[in-house]
Amino acid sequence: MRIIILGSGMYVTGRNGTGTGTILSSLAQSSKAMDIEEVLVVSKSKSSEAQVVEAMYRINTKLKSNLSVRFALLEDDFEKQLQK
């Protein structure tokens, strides 16, 4: 299964000391019982990439999981094309 997450805020990554978040930690736990090939997190903020990488490391370490997560930046050009 391949999953796309739109957004990378507190519920996804557990930012600013709020813990592990809900979304990525739930997927990491679920990946132990089901085949999750990859998760793609899409965000409009380039700075979110480092937060997603850090969150996945923290979550995988804490839950002893091995969830693969990629990050994609939603560019303004792409967003403009979607609005057409």
Image (cartoon, rainbow, N blue to C red):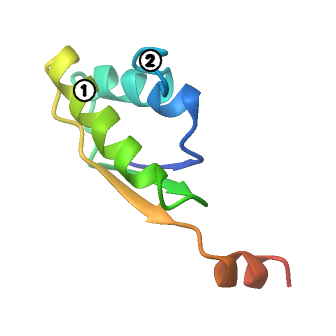
Residue wearing tag 2: 17
Quote the CA–CA distance across marks 2 and 1.
12 Å
The crowd level at tag 2 (other Cα within 10 Å; few <14, some 14-19, many 20+) is few
Query: Which of the pair 61/37 is nearer the observer?
Result: 61
Q: Is residue 30 visible?
A: yes
In the rendered image, residue 51, in percent from the top left (x then y), is placed at 39, 42
| Marks 2 and 1 close (CB-CB < 8 Å) | no
In the rendered image, residue 66, in percent from the top left (x then y), is placed at 16, 34
> Residue drawn 75% across and 85% down?
81
Is 1 situated above or below 56?
Answer: below
Residue wearing tag 1: 58
> Residue drawn 47% across and 24% down?
14
Residue 61: name its quadrant: top left
> Residue drawn 33% across and 23% down?
30
Earlier along the polypeptide chain: callout 2 or callout 1? 2
Q: Amino acid at mark 2?
A: Gly
Q: Which disc is residue 42 wearing?
A: none
> Residue drawn 57% across and 26% down?
11
In the rendered image, residue 40, in percent from the top left (x then y), is placed at 41, 54
The crowd level at tag 1 (other Cα within 10 Å; few <14, some 14-19, many 20+) is some
Element at label 1: helix
